[in-house]
Amino acid sequence: MSHSLVTMSYIVATILFIFSLSGLSNQETARRGNYYGMLGMAIAIIATALSASVTSYAILIVALLIGGAIGAKAALKVEMTQMPELVAIMHSLVGMAAVLVGYANFMDASTTLSGVEKNIHEVEIYIGILIGAVTFSGSVIAFGKLSERISGKPMLLPGRHWLNLGLLIAAVILGRMFLQQTETGGGTLPLLLMTVIALAFGIHMVMAIGGADMPVVVSMLNSYSGWAAAATGFMLSNDLLIVTGALVGSSGAILSYIMCRAMNRNFISVIAGGFGTSGGEAAVIEGEVTPISAEETAQLLLDAKNIMIIPGYGMAVAQAQHTVNEITKLLRDKGKKVGFGIHPVAGRMPGHMNVLLAEAKVPYDIVYEMDEINEDWGHVDVSIVIGANDIVNPSALDDPNSPIAGMPVLECWKGETTVVLKRSMASGYAGVGNPLFVLENTRMLFGDANATMQAVLKALKG
């Protein structure tokens, strides 16, 4: 394929990627956005494979078959509840690719660059490996936390911010040494040392982050993976990889910023790591819970006029979204006003609950963001909290020592009655007790979310 045709294909792929991001910004167009992204990636792969820069087709075909098989298996096997950790581990692969491409470029003896061009290329290699290593190790730790292989509690080392600063300064000094030594054919040792430091920084950065803030970590690592891809593009002189990486990096950074605002977190502290933590002791929750049966819950819903459903990670685990949609249809047919309240960090990654509700074909026009409904709880007769904990925790507003202090939450307790569906009284992912459970107007419906909602549906049909 000629160079001009490859360039044209890259331009078309870039436009499709932009359409994809635009489509993914809205629930109603998300499916179309996915199709745009798939088509753009297919064009990018085919154009690159047929370009003059590719000569070893045997290796390329083997790599495509292996990668395609792994991707197909993941798509077929991974449950919706495992999507957050899948996203995290995929980010780690982007970081690893940036590191491997960087070292391959560094060891490439056929490079004929000299002077300023050689210096710029070496800076690209150094920065690409640095970003890639941070992304790789940070994403692996995020995967461990999201899959609960690693504790969700933050690991707070003494002087952790000074440690981060020291690692950054060391990386800068090693970068200077690397550029100096490459002039005489060296540079391997400072590059290896920097890689170790970057890996340690990624581990420390994510380990210091509390469980409640992991959705922001996912979007932050998404941004890092984009910049790692862009750095790889510079190393390979691939324009499409640069543009695509910049699109992913900037959109991930914007999403992180939006989520930080929604959670009342400082964006700079997200980049530095170790946010979402508290130095004090959280208040102890005291009081008795009031249990309720599925039949009593059904009667509450039949007597109510305005109902708000708050989905959380527990709904994803129980795969109760389809039953919830059936209940929603039944109640709306009876003239009830039913809506869904979505917190920006509900679940384990941005948009997790929106995806579940879209899968169950819940109408988009009854799904509301937190800012749209938090002023209207006084008009809600019954709130149904399905497997959510931290996002409906009053201690975020009134306990300054809570790990989630300052985070805006869905203030469902201001409604007439709140029914909370939980398997047990265990705390949420942030490990914080929830005083909502012992409030006078709260009722606890214990059991598997799908089983209990099916019992409620049966009672409603009664």
Image (cartoon, helix red, strand yellow):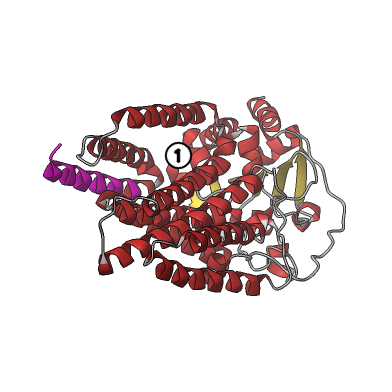
Magenta span covers which residues?
A: 1-21
For label 1, the crowd category at 10 Å Cα-Cα, with few meaning under 14, some 14 to 19 and many 20 or more, is some
Q: Secondary structure at mark 1?
A: loop
- Would you identify the image quadrant in which residue 35 lies? top left
The residue located at (25%, 52%) in the rendering is 239
Residue 374, position as x, y percentages in the image: 57, 60
- As for residue 15 lying within the magenta part, the answer is yes
Q: How many marks?
A: 1
Residue 444 in which image quadrant: top right
Of 288 and 306, which appears nearest the observer? 288
Locate residue 450, reporting x and y percent. 66, 31
Q: Quadrant of the C terminus?
A: top right
The amino acid type of the residue labelled 1 equals Pro
Asked whether the viewer can see residue 249, the reply is yes
Farthest residue, direction front: 184
Across and down, in percent, residue 337 comes to 53, 44
Which residue is at 55% across, 49% downward? Answer: 349
Q: Is 137 drawn above or below residue 360 in the view shown?
A: below
**Label 1 sits on residue:** 363
User: In the image, is 115 to the left or to the right of 197?
Assistant: left
Q: Looking at the magenta stretch, what is its main secondary structure?
A: helix
Which residue is at a point 75% across and 71% down the rendered structure image?
279
Residue 308, percent from left and from top: 59, 47
Question: Which quadrant of the figure contains the N terminus?
Answer: top left
